[in-house]
Image: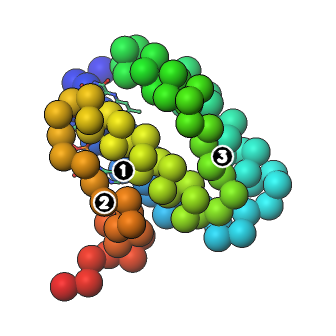
């Protein structure tokens, strides 16, 4: 398997990209699919210590799947929790769409 860093970078890309393409106004079934995906993901993620901590985060902070922006911000918060644990800088969650959806304006 890839190392924990390579796996992590690829996985965050996938997760934030899922947030970026999630509907603004998701149906009930889209909401339950996303919630189910996040819960199964947390059991299957192939870095077991990472998965354990992520599962306990889910227990404290339920995923918010009511809209694209709610989910994107929730995911940003979850990523920041891992950043904090690893001593990496905090990401400004008001900018998640610029990073992952619309592109930086510069
Ligand atoms: P990454 O953290 O991989 O981030 C990639 C890019 O996302 C960054 O360059 C930045 O542009 C952007 N970004 C950064 N923060 C945010 C944010 N909050 N919101 C939106 N975008 C952001 N590694 C461990 O060593 N121990 C662990 O316990 C651990 N747990 C993990 C749990 C999960 C669920 C995942 C997906 C990964 C975990 N990792 C863990 C891996 C770790 O988070 C990093 O992916 C890895 O260290 C590589 O870091 P990086 O500096 O390349 O940037």
Which residue is located at x 28 percent, y 54 percent?
91
Which residue carries the number 3 mark? 34
Give the mark nearer the N terminus: 3 vs 1: 1
Where 17 falls versus 33 (above or below)?
A: below
Where 18 falls versus 47 (above or below)?
A: below
Badge 1 residue CB within 8 Å of ligand 1: yes
Which residue is located at x 73 percent, y 51 percent?
31
Q: Quick one: quadrant of the C terminus?
A: bottom left
Q: Nearer the viewer, residue 9 or 91?
A: 91
Other residues around mark 2 within 10 Å, as few (<14) / some (14–19) / many (≥20) = few
Is mark 3 in CB contact (under 8 Å) with mark 2?
no
In what element is the residue under mark 2? loop
What is the spatial separation of the Cα atoms under label 2 and label 1, in whole angstroms?
A: 17 Å
Residue 43 percent coordinates (x, y): 55, 21
In what element is the residue under mark 3? helix
Residue 25 percent coordinates (x, y): 71, 69
Which residue carries the number 2 mark? 92
Give the mark nearer the N terminus: 3 vs 2: 3
Which residue is located at x 51 percent, y 22 percent?
56
Q: Is residue 51 visible?
A: no
In what element is the residue under mark 1? helix
Q: Nearer the viewer, residue 91 or 37?
A: 91
Residue 1 percent coordinates (x, y): 30, 20
In the visual, does 62 lie left or right of 4? Answer: right
How many marks can you see?
3
What is the spatial separation of the Cα atoms under label 3 and label 2, in whole angstroms?
A: 23 Å
Q: In the rendered structure, find residue 13 and report the number of the disc placed on it.
A: 1
In the visual, does 35 lie left or right of 56? Answer: right
In terms of image quadrants, where is residue 84? top left
């Amino acid at each position: 398997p890839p190392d924990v860093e390579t796996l992590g970078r690829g996985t965050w890309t996938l997760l934030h990209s899922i947030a970026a393409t999630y509907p603004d106004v998701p149906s009930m079934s889209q909401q339950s699919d996303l919630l189910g995906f996040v819960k199964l993901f947390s059991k299957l993620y192939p870095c077991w210590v990472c998965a354990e901590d992520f599962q306990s985060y889910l227990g404290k902070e339920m995923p918010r799947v009511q809209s694209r922006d709610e989910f994107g911000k929730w995911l940003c918060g979850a990523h920041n929790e891992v950043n904090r644990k690893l001593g990496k800088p905090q990401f400004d969650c008001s900018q998640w769409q610029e990073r992952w959806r619309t592109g930086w304006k510069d």
